[in-house]
Image (spheres, rainbow, N blue to C red):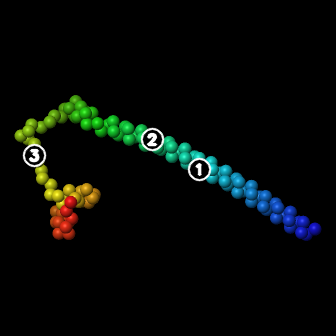
Amino acid sequence: MARAGILLLLLIVCGLSLVTSRYQARKLFVELERSRQQTQTYEVEYGRLQLESSTWSVPARIDRLARGSLAMQLPEPGRIQVIEVPPTQIFLRERGKEVTSQTASQATLQGATP
């Protein structure tokens, strides 16, 4: 009789653990599906934002707005000045470093040329 009681108790514990694990699996599956749906929503939003960004940055649109809304115009050829930037400063800017006269001279000493 004691054996039957232990087996019955063991059967109940196993049944409860099975129900609990199935519940957790379903709960995790629902969470996974929500995450997938949210990922898809973000991907659609990202694509829309990329399209919007490319539309806003079309050179013809920028030129039209600059001339129309801001009353800007191209400078006369005599007013254009070309500024030469040393290759070391270009090299440092491409790597996202702040360029000062000290960092430019240090980079030159260390051989950091493009």
**Residue 103 shows in this picture:** no
Residue denoted by label 1: 32
Question: Under tag 3, what secondary structure?
Answer: loop
Marks counted in the figure total 3
Question: Under tag 1, what secondary structure?
Answer: helix
Q: Earlier in the sequence, mark 3 or mark 2?
A: 2
Label pair 1/3, CB-CB below 8 angstroms: no
The structure residue drawn at horizontal position 82% and vertical position 61%, both measured from the top left corner, is 11
Q: Is residue 40 left or right of residue 102?
A: right
Marker disc for residue 94:
none
In the rendered image, the quadrant that contains the C terminus is: bottom left
| Residue most extreme to the right | 1
Q: Is residue 113 left or right of residue 55?
A: left
Residue denoted by label 2: 45
- What amino acid type should be assigned to the residue bearing mark 1? Leu
State the separation of the CA atoms marked 1 and 3: 59 Å
Residue denoted by label 3: 81
Is residue 85 shown above or below 77? below
**Looking at the rendering, which quadrant does residue 7 occupy?**
bottom right
